[in-house]
Image: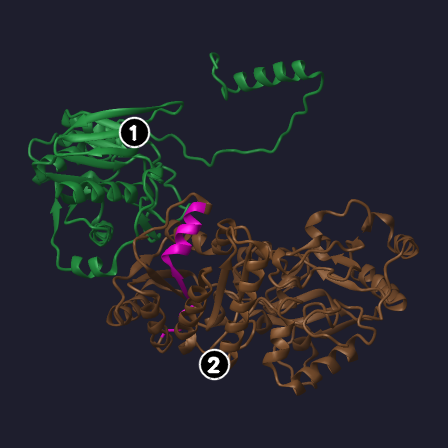
Amino acid sequence: MNIVVCVKQVPATQKVDVDPKTGVLLRNGIDTKMNPFDLVAMEAAKKIAARTGAKIHALTMGPNSAIEVLKESFALGANEGWLLSDRRFAGADVLATAYSLAYAIRAIGNVDLIICGKQTTDGDTAQVGPEMAEVLGIPHISWALELEEIDEKGLTLRQDLTTKDAIVRIDYPCLITVEKSMYQPDLPSYRLYKAGKDLKIHTLTADDLTLIDHTRIGLNGSPTQVERIFAPSSNTDTQRLEGDIDNIADKLYTILKNTKLLKEEV
Amino acid sequence: MLNIVTAEHISAIKDLLGPELVNDQAINEDYSHDEMTIYGTKMPDLVVTPRCTEDVAKLLKYANDNRLAIIPRGAGTGLCGGCVAINGGILIDMTRMDKILEIDKKTMTATFEPGVILMNAIEKVSEEGFLYAPDPGEKSATIGGNVMTNAGGMRAIKYGVTRDHIKGLEIVLADGSILTIGGKIAKNSSGYDLKDLIIGSEGTLAVVTKIITKIIPKPKLMTSLLIPFNTLKEALEAVPYITNLEYVATTIEFMEKEVIEDARLYLGKDFPNKDYNAYLIVSYSGNNKAELSRMIESCAELALEKRAIDVFISDTEERQASIWDARGAFLEAIKNSTTEMDECDVVVDIDKVSDFNDFAKNVADRENIRMRSFGHAGDGNLHIYILKDDMPDDLWRNKAKAFMDALYEEASILKGQVSGEHGIGHAKKGYLRDSLDPKVIDLMKKIKIAFDPNNILNPSKVIDID
């Protein structure tokens, strides 16, 4: 059995500049770390591998420096590392990223399970995982909270549906995205990190991905146009409600509804 | 001989300071104890919350003239009854004096009022790009309380304790006179260092009203290593070798599986790599990744050579939080796991920590009492807790006493000291008296009387005068 864990190098700090023209994060020279959600994905992969004997492949897309996140994957228990790296992939939006990664997974071959973090801390879209599953034509479950059962055929998961949890069953091949609360991720092991120095990292370029449509990758293959990136505004305005308790409750309900903090049916 | 606080005294103090600073009605129960109720609780007769040095001076002069006991208190997070009015008296709550007065980059000093909460002091200094290096575990303590107990903390191995970072103090003497000792100056060989006498005096010599601390450039990077061992003995035996390495660790802490489980239950949050019996946490700080990598590698290689099972690397904010949040919660977690506890804060030579901890475990087994320990492996300061659970009161008191007597005797044999960082208060003064040369105790008494001839300042704490 083969598990692919998608990992991404993200800025280690919140203070990142944005290219005013393209809206792309300026990552050069800033400290990086593995996306915290992906650490949970790696942990889930280890639990499943411990039960099934699966091999864990870590896959990332990025420049050569992204090799670091694969070395960290080895220190966390990955057996193989795959770097999808080509200038033609640069500037990809969610759709182009998911498309490219899906083809990389096809290139790895015989993959039974793909695990992604629910979202990344730099993009925050939570869409790459599900879109990859669509490109690959396999079922997926996003927002997985717990692994209830692990077996040779598939997984039973607890899924977070915001107001309710659902227990769902999914057979391999499939993709899941995991919530941060699923596991406390282990720390990277110095022993594994050292052993990982001898492990080969497979590099894939656009030319290695058979049948990929080159018009659907990189900045040019990205339909998303970022018009503006800005820090969310915040204020400390307060409003005082007066009157009897029923009256205040009605006013509060109206405010919460109008600001879409409450849904009509609640 | 001190007088009992009367209605006339209270009325006079209200006139002196204004009634809004004086509370003699419905005094909050919190004022009757610190974190260790085992050492007894007692409500003060009066709580005064001064706004400024002059308020303190007026109160002390009045108390001195009328022979009334003054018990200074910060956040009440002490562990030896130091801020408890065990014989009644006026509790002076310093938390209203909580201004951060200055961060002076030119002299690299920060000036605080004593009621500033440690975490706020650390944060403010950090915002300016500096580090207030002492790192006591209880971040909700006041900086004044830290000065009064000479609080230690986890970075003592590299940076020293609170005393090593205090440059100047403004104090109010028992007679109400206001003095400044030390200052922003970098060095001082001008006569006896009264500042160092005041630090760690637990409110028995003077009341501190202003604190000037050293601040240092903040290291840009910090990485911690979580190092698991099969036994605590193996972990502790590795420590002197780690301290001999070329790079000085910022922190070397030890802990066992059980206390980590207590923290997990208390915080509702898992610890990473939690399936091992014993751990060291070793931290290094530096300014570039290459330097830090060398530190990590040298420590990791040595630890593996000294029977560590592996070395886990904590190098991001989330990872640091996953281990340090647990470490920071140990005391509260242990407290939460039982009905009452007693603690021992001895300090021994760092190559004796393992022997001492083994000794404590043996005594706990002999007394059939549940024990938890963790502490600062890098500076020889152990925190050993015994837990009452469902033991009947009398039995618990007897066992706790037998346990502590044995531990302090052993510490004395090993040439250790009664308290590494929590202080003496009233709880440990018997052990202090027994552990020191009588001539030392006699000198301490003379110092106390020189500062406070009427013994109004935190009487019956640290040493007994009579």
Picture layout, residue A242 above or below residue A19: above
Q: Which residues are magenta?
A: B247-265
Specify the chain shown as green. Answer: A
Residue A126 rendering spot, x and y as whole percentages? 31, 31
Where on the picture, by quarter, is residue A172? top left
Residue B161 rendering spot, x and y as whole percentages? 55, 70
Which mark is on residue A76? none
Which mark is on residue B414? 2
Picture layout, residue A99 above or below residue B17: above
What residue is drawn where x is 41% and y is 48%?
B264
> Is residue A95 visible in the rendered structure shown here?
no
Q: Nearer the viewer, mark 2 or mark 1?
A: 2
Chain letter of disc 2?
A: B
Q: Which residue is mark 1?
A: A158
Specify the chain shown as brown. Answer: B
- Amino acid type at image mark 2: Leu
Is residue B367 toward the left or the right of residue B5 in the image?
A: left
Q: Nearer the viewer, residue A147 or A200?
A: A147
> Is residue A129 visible in the rendered structure shown here?
yes
Residue B377 on the magenta span: no
Q: Of helix, strand and loop, which one carries label 2? A: loop
Its colouring scheme is by chain
Packing grade of label 1 (10 A; few <14, some 14-19, many >=20) is: many
The span from disc 2 to disc 1 (Cα, nearest Å) is 56 Å
What residue is drawn where x is 67% and y is 67%?
B426
Residue B260 on the magenta span: yes
Residue B177 rendering spot, x and y as whole percentages? 83, 71
| Residue contact between numbered discs 2 and 1, judged by CB atoms under 8 Å | no
